[in-house]
Image (cartoon, rainbow, N blue to C red):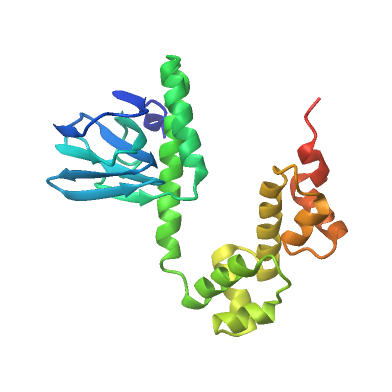
Amino acid sequence: MEECRELPLLFYAYRRRLVGNVSAHSHGGCELIYLLRGSCRVEGPLGVLAGRSGQLLVIPPETVHNQIDSPDEKNIFCVFQAPPGLFEQRWRTIDLAGEAWCRRWLLELSSMTERNDFEGANAILLGLLLRLSAFEKKRAAAEHLHPGLRKALAFIYNNFSRRISVEQIAEASGISVSLLRKLFVDYCGTSPVRYLQDLRISRAEEMLKSPGLSISEISLRCGFENPGYFIRLYRRKYGAPPGRRRRPAN
């Protein structure tokens, strides 16, 4: 792990807008291009990468490539050198739509670059690469899930805001209740009921950022018919009642 702590960055920057396209070129390190809006097409000897908002293009070191942007295209890009085992530097597109952490971390990376805070930028980049690697491994594992569990997870995500039972989840998944429970313990490390509760609490945590919703409204929108029960579960997970989430720290 010692070799992963120091990343000799070649160059990284935030590109707000570039008039015209980028002609054929290459870098001495791996390049990441994250699309903030619009779309772009990257062509090279390894094929064609087509990216849209929320996607990350990965271009290996020393790979000659061009870049063709849509008129409204806006991106963040960085070029880096890192140990091969830290992040797979392979030609590909990673769909990160809905994964706001990637956008935040890259914006912070560019901000630190502008402030010449290279030590902080190294730390952010290291965390970003580790997170991207974990994200891809998790997605690859999900593609090999038992089909019944995959259906169960989809059913829960689509129906967490209303009252659903373990029996309903199993029926929607086409498997028995006993198999459903076993699959959740084996693959998710918890029971279907606890998984559903954790999902609801996590969604409630996001909704608490909206000042226009009361605790009771959030409770109902997340599938808790009893606000008191929601508050108890929230306190158990976060160590404080949900109302504390909205009060500024002293």
- In the rendered image, residue 96, in percent from the top left (x then y), is placed at 43, 49
Specify the quadrant of the image occupied by residue 164.
Answer: bottom right
- In the picture as drawn, the residue positioned furthest to the right comes out as 228
Picture residue at 22% right of the left edge, 32% below the top: 20
Specify the quadrant of the image occupied by residue 190.
Answer: bottom right
In the image, is 28 to the left or to the right of 243? Answer: left
- In the rendered image, residue 108, in percent from the top left (x then y), is placed at 48, 28
- Number of numbered discs present? 0
Picture residue at 27% right of the left edge, 35% below the top: 30
Picture residue at 74% right of the left edge, 64% below the top: 223
- In the rendered image, residue 159, in percent from the top left (x then y), is placed at 64, 69
Front position in the image: 198 or 23: 23
- In the picture as drawn, the residue positioned furthest to the front comes out as 71
Picture residue at 29% right of the left edge, 29% below the top: 18
Q: In the rendered image, is residue 81 in sight? A: yes
In the image, is 57 to the left or to the right of 127? Answer: left
Quadrant into which the N terminus falls: top left
Above or below residue 121? Residue 154 is below
Specify the quadrant of the image occupied by residue 194.
Answer: bottom right
In the image, is 61 to the left or to the right of 159? Answer: left
